[in-house]
Amino acid sequence: MKRIAMVFAAFVLGAGAVRAETWGTITANWQGEEQTWFITAKDGESQSSHDDSAKVIDGFTLWGNPRETDLAATGNTIVLSFYVMRGPRGKEAHGTDFYYLLSGFSDKWEAGEEDTEVSLELFDKTDTTVHVRGTFEASPMREGETTRVEGVFDVTFPLD
C-alpha cells in the first residue's frame, strides 16, 4: 500500500511539473470582459500552427487556450486563422476566420472572412522563428445572435 501511495504521489507531483511552453497570447474583449488566451505547445506539438509550404503564403492558426497550462482546450477557447501574403502595402492578412469555442466545434460562435478582419503590425520571419503581431475584429454569430470582439495577438512560432 505504501508503494502505491508513493507511486501515486510521484505521478501527481510529476504531472504538476509538466508545463506547456507559451509561444504567445491573444487578448480580447469577449462579451464585455477583457481576457487573455495562451498559444501553447509541449515538446513542439501545439493546436496552433504555422505553414509556409507554399513559400509565398504563410498560414496561421492561433489556438488560444484559457489557461497557460492548457495544450488543447475546447471550452472558452479562441481560434483565429489567417493567411499572410505580400500586398500593395507589404504583408497583409487574408482568408480570416474567428471561432469562440464553448464546447469544441459542436457549440461555437463563428465569423468567416466577411465578418473577420486581421491587421498585421509585425511579420518577422528568420531562419529559426516567425513572429506575428496584430489586431483583429470579428462579428461572430451563434443561434441567430451576433456579438462583437476586438483583440490583439502576439505569437512567435519556432521553425523546424
Image: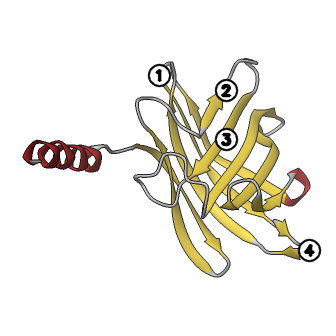
Q: Earlier in the sequence, mark 3 or mark 1?
A: 3
Circles 4 and 2: CB atoms closer than 8 Å = no
Give amino acid for label 1: Thr
Q: Could you say whether the residue bearing mark 4 is in a helix, strand or loop?
A: loop
Circles 3 and 1: CB atoms closer than 8 Å = no
Is residue 91 visible to us here? Answer: no
Q: CA distance from mark 1 to mark 2?
A: 14 Å
Please state the horizontal and vertical placement of residue 68, each as a whole percent of the image: 42, 54
Q: Is residue 34 depicted above or below 96 in this figure?
A: below
Q: Is residue 123 depicted above or below 78 in this figure?
A: above
Q: Could you say whether the residue bearing mark 1 is in a helix, strand or loop?
A: loop
Mark 4 lies on residue? 144
Please name which of the two marks, 1 or 2, marks the residue nearer to the observer: 2
Q: Earlier in the sequence, mark 4 or mark 2?
A: 2
Q: Earlier in the sequence, mark 1 or mark 2?
A: 2
Give amino acid for label 3: Thr
Residue at position x 60%, y 48% in the image: 63
Q: CA distance from mark 4 to mark 2?
A: 33 Å
Please name which of the two marks, 3 or 4, marks the residue nearer to the observer: 4
Q: CA distance from mark 3 to mark 4?
A: 26 Å
Left or right, 153 with respect to 61, comes to left
The numbered disc on residue 61 is: 3
Q: Earlier in the sequence, mark 3 or mark 4?
A: 3
Closer to the camera, 8 or 80? 8
Circles 2 and 3: CB atoms closer than 8 Å = no
Closer to the camera, 119 or 12? 12
Residue reaching furthest left?
2
Closer to the camera, 94 or 33? 33
Mark 2 lies on residue? 51
Q: CA distance from mark 1 to mark 4?
A: 44 Å
